[in-house]
Image (cartoon, helix red, strand yellow):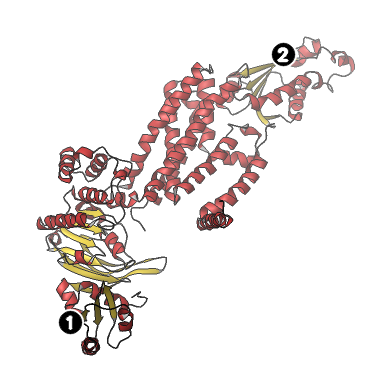
Amino acid sequence: MTAEHGTDLAISVRGLSKSFDRKTVLQGFGIDVERGAIYGFLGPNGSGKTTTIRMLCGLLRPDAGSGTCLGYDVIRETAAIKRRVGYMTQRFSLYEDLSIRENLDFVARIYGVKKPRQVVRETLDRLGLTSRQRQLAGHLSGGWKQRLALAASVMHKPELLLLDEPTAGVDPSARREFWDNIHELAETGVTVLVSTHYMDEAERCHRIAYLAYGHLLARGTVAEVVASSGLSTWVVEGAPNGLAVEMRGMPGVDSVAAFGRRLHVSGRDGARLAGAMTAIQQRGLAAHETVPSLEDVFIRLMSEQPGGNA
Amino acid sequence: MFSVRRFAAVVVKEFVQMRRDRLTFAMMVGIPIVQLVLFGFAINSDPKSLPTAVLANDNSAFSRSLVRAMENTGYFRVVAVVDKEADIRQMLREGAVQFAVTIPADFSRDVQRGARPRVLVEADATDPAATSNALGALKELQSLALRHDLKGSLAALQGAPPPFEIIIHRAYNPEGITQYNIVPALIGVILTMTMVIMTALAVTREIERGTMENLLSMPVRPAEVLLGKILPYSAVGGVQVVIVMAAARLIFDVPFVGNLWLFGALVVVFVMTNLALGLMFSTVARNQLQAMQMAIFFFLPSILLSGFMFPYRGMPAWAQALGEILPLTHFLRITRGILLKGSGWRDIAPEVWPLLAFFAVVLLIAMRRYRQTLD
């Protein structure tokens, strides 16, 4: 077992499955995550992201499958995993009726952090919360709650950080700051697995995995995922009202997304889509081909799934 | 303006939510039925067939007639006939019998001589309500018990004054002061209510607020969480005990005959038992409302079937068996024993084992039910 602890894979799981009340949430899921990587976890709501993260840190027991997390068995050695993992839940799960400081003290002691008082003091300083340490955590704004939760989950210097939609409901500048933090942590060798719905965040990850309805649909770097999608995307500028609706019915067009007056038109059959776009150009509208964005790719992936909502 | 449609919308929504929470709904309907049957048949404020020990120093037809007459009142049931005074005292102190009847030597001879012998009836009056009706029935016996025996030449002994005298001694609570019984018992009642409810909410609160997920993701073991949750509430229980004891002493003048340390130790056992039960509820209930309902569902039989509100010995056998399971039943006996009777460890040990057994079973269930995962 000890030999494995030295491998450069932080997470290596195969065939993970989980169902609740006979409803399958995750089906034969497997990934490898290198140490020090920032791994993005994407997919629609209910695709199994949270379930996967919970299984990795021992909060849920997989029905089937096996693997290791930081070299420890995800089924039998959850206690060892919990000591080395930092987990930030989707919903704020520190104690709202404890002060900021009391929360940090509690977490530091549960993890058996050495010199807990000093670690907590440093954490408060770094967060800039020293002057508000006596404030109840429940009174913090969404952005501050998120900062506090992240700080609490890294006090014990985890080797792996599991973040479940950490930036949901957080303003853009706080999100930017949060991601700067994540990159700093990754540079110190921490592996980060983060689930998100934001495409700009996905693009800040080293690698991403796309999960839908319990199945892993795509993985790799952002460029690889885009390239492997086989998708063509065109941009139409200055589109009049009604054009988006009209274009959805055109041959070769799989999806149309409006960004103000600009439309992103995507399709899997590049030649047919080019034909449709030629017709648009003939109407005097500016249209040119572009590299599909991650969002175009994901919307495409989502609509291919049975029960998909695109 | 009050809109009937908006009002109706709220009503419908409430009904839908009520129906969603199956357990709560079942309890709302089930609890009244169970309670009605349970308490309707179990509670009896005029206890009969109370266990009685007889020390018959005079084995004669007269003394047998007296014992039979006592049994015929329906209040006394002779469970033991002993011939040593120490034995009868011990039975009374242990609570094995409610009454101890001492028939003097030469009872028969003294009756015939018209010397009007005295029969001593000692009652365990720690709970005055349990004995008052029975003692009331004794007065008539003085003139009626020997009616059939005093015939012929002895017939003249009938009538006033009666042929013998019954001396009643209310042991442990001679003046029959209700407070002596109720105030110490309230320690148990208060602890049962607060300890169970507080801990019942302890785990469900974490689940409801979403903090359980964080707690479970951290390297903390179930025993650490459960015991860590029990300890602070034990301290609260300790404060409650001190308050009630002080009030019992200073305001109600309740005597404290027994050993304070023994009592203190057993209070700890009782508190732990209730906390463990609260934790068990906490691990079974899905939300705080359910936990609260379970606590109340447990609390009612505790006060009604334990001997707190109504005499334990007045209940039918099945209800007594049920009461025997409840920690409060045993704690009440311990409290009355130590405070009023001065009982020592040997006298009350039979009440301690059931408490410990209850504690162990309930804690075991709580430990097994407490999940280390979110499954």
Can residue B80 be seen here? The reply is: no
The chain to which mark 1 is attached is A
Label ID, residue A289:
1
Where does residue A234 sit, x and y in percent of width and height?
21, 81
Are labels 2 and 1 on one chain? no
Q: In the rendered image, which quarter is residue B305 located in?
A: top right
Where does residue B225 sit, x and y in percent of width and height?
33, 44
State how far apart marks 2 and 1 are (Cα): 119 Å
Amino acid marked by disc 1: Glu
Q: Is residue A119 above or below residue A159?
A: above
Provide the residue designation for mark 2. B118
Label ID, residue B35:
none
Can residue A309 be seen here? The reply is: yes
Disc 1 on helix, strand or loop? strand
State the residue in front, A282 or A265.
A282
**Which of label 2 and label 1 is nearer to you?**
1
B43 left or right of B235?
A: right
Locate the C terminus of chain B and report the quarter of the image it occupies: bottom left
State the residue in front, B349 or A129.
A129
